[in-house]
Image: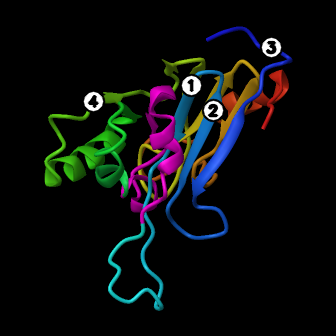
């Protein structure tokens, strides 16, 4: 990843999940790189007769496929991973997540015959992955599912903090509490968004 540049621009493009429940998917674009955070589906509303699932419109990603570096997943709920088997058919890039999240994704990929064709990478909390001009750090959070993460997305324009879904729980039933110290460190250094 390049050093921070005051002239650099980053686009945050919500492809789903805004003003609705479900279908969480956001693209982050800077220079020649696009990363996608989450890839969820939504369940149909009562007026959507005959519809089983609602998946996001990813035509922008298809048009810019050469820039797309990977999917980075915050946790394993359907509204964050459910559309992956449908989207990966057209946008076959690596998928990054924590151990439980990747295991849940692998189960979906197996069901859709995509396991052999999809690169997956398990990332531990505290570790980072470099994707194009981005560096993404996985930060431990708590949620109603284990192995949830927030993401510190380091870009040439600055740091973007994507919390994913979370709750503050000092005594979680499973695993460690959220890494609030890391959030504080990032805050002191300065966060762009």
Label 1 near label 3: C-beta < 8 Å? no
Whole-number angstrom distance, CA of label 3 to CA of label 1: 16 Å
Q: How is the image coloured?
A: rainbow
Reply above or below: 2 against 172.
above
Q: Who's the residue at 23% across and 44% down the image?
A: 106
Q: Residue furthest top?
A: 3
Which residues make up the magenta segment? 55-82
Whole-number angstrom distance, CA of label 4 to CA of label 1: 18 Å
The image's mark for residue 119 is 4
Residue under label 1, please give it: 33
Q: Position of residue 149 (x, y in %)?
A: 52, 40
Task: Compare marks 4 and 1 and give the one earlier in the sequence.
Answer: 1
Give the structural element (helix, strand or loop) at label 4.
loop
Q: Tell me if 156 is positioned left or right of 131 in this view.
A: right
Say few, some or many: other residues with alpha carbon within 10 Å of mark 1 (under 14 / 14 to 19 / 20 or more).
some
Whole-number angstrom distance, CA of label 1 to CA of label 2: 6 Å
Say few, some or many: other residues with alpha carbon within 10 Å of mark 2 (under 14 / 14 to 19 / 20 or more).
many
Residue under label 2, please give it: 29
Residue under label 3, please give it: 5
Label 4 near label 3: C-beta < 8 Å? no
Q: Position of residue 49 (x, y in %)?
A: 38, 89
Q: Who's the residue at 27% across and 29% down the image?
A: 119
Whole-number angstrom distance, CA of label 2 to CA of label 3: 15 Å
Q: Nearer the viewer, mark 2 or mark 4?
A: 2
The image's mark for residue 167 is none
Q: Residue furthest front?
A: 63
Task: Compare marks 2 and 4 and give the one earlier in the sequence.
Answer: 2
């Amino acid at each position: 990843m390049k050093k921070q540049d005051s002239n650099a621009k980053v686009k945050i493009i919500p492809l789903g999940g805004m003003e609705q429940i479900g279908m969480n998917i956001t693209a982050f674009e800077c220079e020649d790189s696009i990363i996608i955070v989450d890839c969820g589906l939504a369940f149909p509303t009562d007026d959507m007769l005959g519809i089983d699932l609602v998946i996001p419109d990813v035509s922008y990603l298809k048009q810019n496929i050469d820039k797309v570096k990977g999917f980075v997943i915050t946790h394993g709920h359907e509204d964050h991973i459910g559309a992956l088997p449908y989207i990966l058919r057209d946008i076959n890039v690596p998928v990054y997540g924590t151990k439980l999240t990747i295991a849940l994704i692998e189960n979906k990929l197996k069901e859709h015959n995509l396991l052999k064709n999809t690169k997956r990478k398990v990332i531990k909390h505290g570790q980072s992955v470099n994707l194009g001009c981005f560096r993404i750090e996985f930060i431990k959070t708590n949620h109603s599912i284990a192995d949830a993460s927030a993401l510190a997305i380091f870009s040439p324009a600055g740091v973007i903090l994507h919390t994913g879904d979370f709750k503050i729980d000092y005594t979680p039933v499973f695993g460690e509490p959220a890494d609030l110290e890391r959030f504080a460190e990032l805050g002191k250094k300065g966060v762009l968004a």
